[in-house]
Amino acid sequence: MPDAREIEDVCRPAAGAAAGHAASRSRPLNVAILGSTGSIGGSTLDVAAASDGRIRPWLLAACRSTSRLAAQAQQVQPAWVVVTDEQAAADPALKHLPAGTRLAVGQDALCELVQATEVDRVVSAIVGAAGLASTWAALEVGKTVALANKETLVMAGPLVMQLAARQGAAILPVDSEHSAIMQALRSGSAREVRRLLLTASGGPFRTKPAEMLATVTPAQALAHPTWSMGPKITIDSATMMNKALELIEARWLFDIPAEQIDVVVHPQSIVHSMVEFVDGSVVAQLSPPDMKLPIQLALDHPQRYDGPARRLDWATAFQLDFEPPDVDRFPALLLGREAASRGGTAGAVLNAANEVAVQSFLDGQIPFTSIAALTKSMLDTHPFDAEPSLDDILRLDAWARREATAWIQNQLAS
């Protein structure tokens, strides 16, 4: 492992035009918000609105939520809005953008615009594998990326980190868990780190008997006890697949073996993750469950400012509970550890199969427990490649989606 200061350097913008900070600028920090209509995108706009002009939404991008995108554009008046779905771009709402706001259409247009010299930081918040291409494009030209799209590192972690290092780009984690680890790692050197501890809320079924999980409904799975998120991420939390994906992400982001990353269930979602050092000291980051805090840290890094995130109320009594995860109830955790240990194409296949499975569960085609079963089947049977190219990863992503769809059709036919 590299020295902790080197780990911190991975998450620190390099000197140069794209990495400068608003405090030393004559203009605001221009931010491209990819996935602006989702929960992370909306919170990013809240952070920008409360920044006293430090942060300017320069580009807003969405796939199909065009009405909300148009409303956001009216509010913040960006230089560009991008709609990646060409059919959705025909929405009449987009004909009434503010003066000075231009419309671009398609994934290629988005990849070109994130490379614009005017863009200082890119918030990568597109959900799923769809976020990889635009994140890759930003890193290719040395941009600083505030990464909420964990699938980028799950699918292509080694290639992405190598690209960032080669181009002098920086990746700043937006996931609350990885943001917490980034902060805690500043307390010691990497050779002093014993393990990283990712906290998990446990989702809505933490105490539900395992034999009852097969009958849970999408509405029940979408009722998260502490976080407000989009449907895909909420279902991932219910299966604990989100923690499996975060384990893989942490493995590549912090360059630490999977065997030194553990998961602990923490229902209150106040301790966002921890670093345990070799002397037994554990350093944690605490705050209420509010994504505006890690978003603001990724945009203002390495400095801190007052902001809109909620604060802990130290005048009110509260408790913090921790327990080991039940891998029998939540087998997705074992799949994530396997994919993190194997590397290669395992992460891409795991992610693709899970995306198909989650959507099929939401559509009422498969039961909740089949999400992990389907994903395991794809992980076990795919043609594993230990050192894939990006093209290989995309090819296996497509393979896993086809095979997962066939698996579901076979289940429906039986």
Image (cartoon, grey):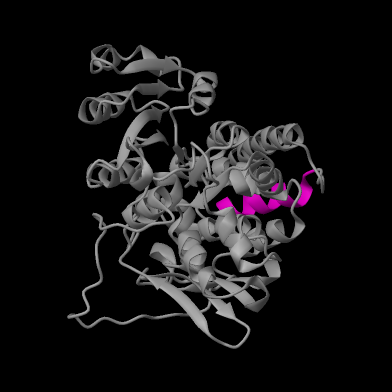
Q: Name the side, left or right, on which 232 lies relative to 280.
A: left
Q: Find out whether residue 238 is within the magenta segment.
A: no
Q: Position of residue 69 (x, y in %)?
A: 31, 27
Q: Residue furthest left?
A: 315
User: Which of the two residues, 294 or 316, is positioned nearer the viewer here?
Assistant: 294
Residue 379 falls within the magenta-colored stretch: yes
Q: Residue at x 68, y 32 (%)?
A: 398
Q: For the C terminus, which image quadrant?
A: top right
Instruction: Note whether 367 is above or below 106 in the view shown.
Output: below
218 sits left or right of 248 in the view = left
Q: Quadrant of residue 139?
A: top right
Residue 73 pos. (x, y %): 27, 26
133 versus 24 height, above or below: above
The image position of residue 228, as x and y in percent, is 32, 53
Q: Describe residue 44's horizontal placement relative to residue 276 as left or right.
A: left
| Front position in the image: 344 or 267 | 344
Q: Provide the residue span drawn in magenta.
A: 371-382
- x and y percentages locating residue 113 in the rendered image: 48, 23
